[in-house]
Image: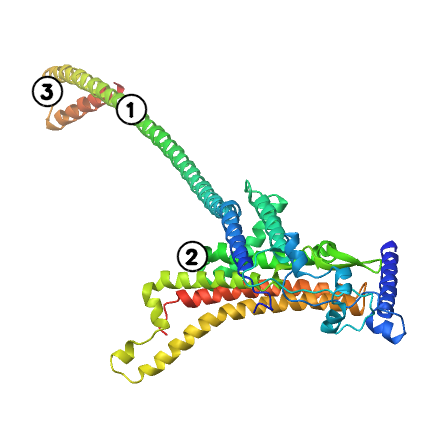
Amino acid sequence: MTTKRILLLLGIVSAVLLIVGFVVGAVGSRMFGLERPFVSQPGIHLPPDPVFPASVRESVVGYRVADKKTDDHGEKAADHGSSEGKESAEEEHHGLGLMQFAVTNTMLSAWLTSIIMLVFFIGGARNPKVIPSRLQALVEMLFELVLNFASSILGPEMGRRAFPVVATIFFFVLFNAWLAIFLIPIYQAVGYGAHVGGEFKLATHLVRPAGTDLNFPLALALVSFVFVEYWGFRAHGFGYLKKFFAFGDILRGRPSGLINVFVGILELVSELVRIVSFTFRLFGNMTAGEILVVMITFLVPFIATQFVFGLELLVGLIQSVIFAGLTLVFLSVAVSHEEH
Amino acid sequence: MVELGLNVPALISYLINYVVLLILLGALAYRPLLNALDSRVDSIRESLAAADRAREEAASSRSAIEEELNEARREGQRLLDQAREAAERFREEEMERARQSAEEFSERARADIARERDAAVDEVRAAFGDLAISAAERIIRRSVDRQAHQELIDQVLAEGEQALRRN
């Protein structure tokens, strides 16, 4: 009875929040003629923001509103196409240069993820016992899940060999994505900003999921690529290159060998394109998730975002499974002894 | 690509981050835990094998016990048979002995009888001699014809026979 009452109460509160959120959100405030929405329009910028050192942060992320207003506010407002009043802060994100070094908020997120992973996994794997503790049982279950997945694709022996690399990719992607959801307050509300017209505006988040930084999926894609090619060479020796440079038949004077040459070039291209597809699949999904969260928060604040978070949990899991799974599949293709 | 955020130092930093994570997790999490899982699998396999062995041992020891029990039963039976046989033999021997002593006894009795009879016959023979002498005396004393002679001999014989019967 009490549980039912609590649930009912929660339902009512949620419904009220949803309605209030809709009313004060971007759509409702326009419909009902409110002055401005509860959450100001978010600025979407793909490159991560530098956090340290502060000089780089300040030069790259333009949140010093007072300066802008005096210097070039009009120009910035025009740039961003903002329809808000003069008081609004114009965030400006130049992004880092190609070779410019700074600690970005996505890097901080990757470090945080790494630390949590190390604590969790090493805590679970330290002094393993025959009758496991709860943490050990949980970690064991996760490891066995990945190990069985790898073994199902590569067979038990090769699966065991590929496990460390693939499991690290899998858990890195998964933990990084889920951490941004479980630690929403830290990820969404902590950062650097400025006072604009007596109101504090956040310009840079201290941490932002590393998946939304192009460099993170690219690094993992390179790891995956190097790992696959390494095993390709290890399994076939330099004969592995014959798959890509299939000149054997042509040199023996068979005209049909042209087809093999063409197929080899296709193989080579597809091998290299994998890096790009790996990178943009993860980057796109994670970034889209983040954008969805901020946009829903902008449109209907408070409660509607919960559904997006649920969706994001699923997306994070799926992306990590895909990243690990594709690495395993490419690996199985590379080490297989079929003639191409 | 720079607009998307491509940044070489960041890329290198993520690569280093990944490699450090891989090395630390590999050394401190994956290897110990997977080894533990392996050893658990081994120990489970071993204990299952041990259970099988114990079951087999129990079965074999039960059959051994049954074998011993059967052996003991057979031994008991054998002893019983032996005893029965010994008793039978003893009985037969005793019977044989009894029969022998009975025969000896009857033999002796028969010998005694024969001896008695021989003595009686000797006695009779001696008596017949006397009778013959007395008969001859009587013949000589009275002369008789042939018929009287025969009657006399018959008479003597009858007397002798009576005397024999009396003895």
Q: Secondary structure at mark 3?
A: loop
Residue furthest toward the bottom? Answer: A255
Tell me the kind of residue under disc 3: Ser
Q: CA distance from mark 1 to mark 2?
A: 92 Å
Q: Label 1 neighbourhood size at 10 Å, few (<14), some (14-19), many (20+)?
A: few
Labels 1 and 3 in the same subunit: yes
Quarter of the image for residue A72 reads: bottom right
Ranked by sequence position, the earlier of labels 1 and 3 is 1
**Percent from the top left, x then y, of residue A60?**
65, 61
- Residue bearing mark 2: A157
Work out which quarter of the rendered image holds the C terminus of chain B and state it: top left
Would residue A168 be visible to someone looking at this image? no
Give the chain of mark 3.
B
Q: Residue at x 49, y 62 (%)?
A: A222
Q: CA distance from mark 2 to mark 3?
A: 155 Å
Q: Is residue B119 left or right of residue B8?
A: left
Work out which quarter of the rendered image holds the N terminus of chain B and state it: bottom right
Q: CA distance from mark 1 to mark 3?
A: 66 Å
Tell me the kind of residue under disc 1: Arg
Scheme of image coloration:
rainbow
- Residue bearing mark 1: B97
Labels 1 and 2 in the same subunit: no
Could you say which disc has been placed on residue B143 in the image? 3
Decide: marks 2, 3 in contact (CB < 8 A)? no
Give the chain of mark 1.
B
**Percent from the top left, x then y, of residue A100?**
56, 59
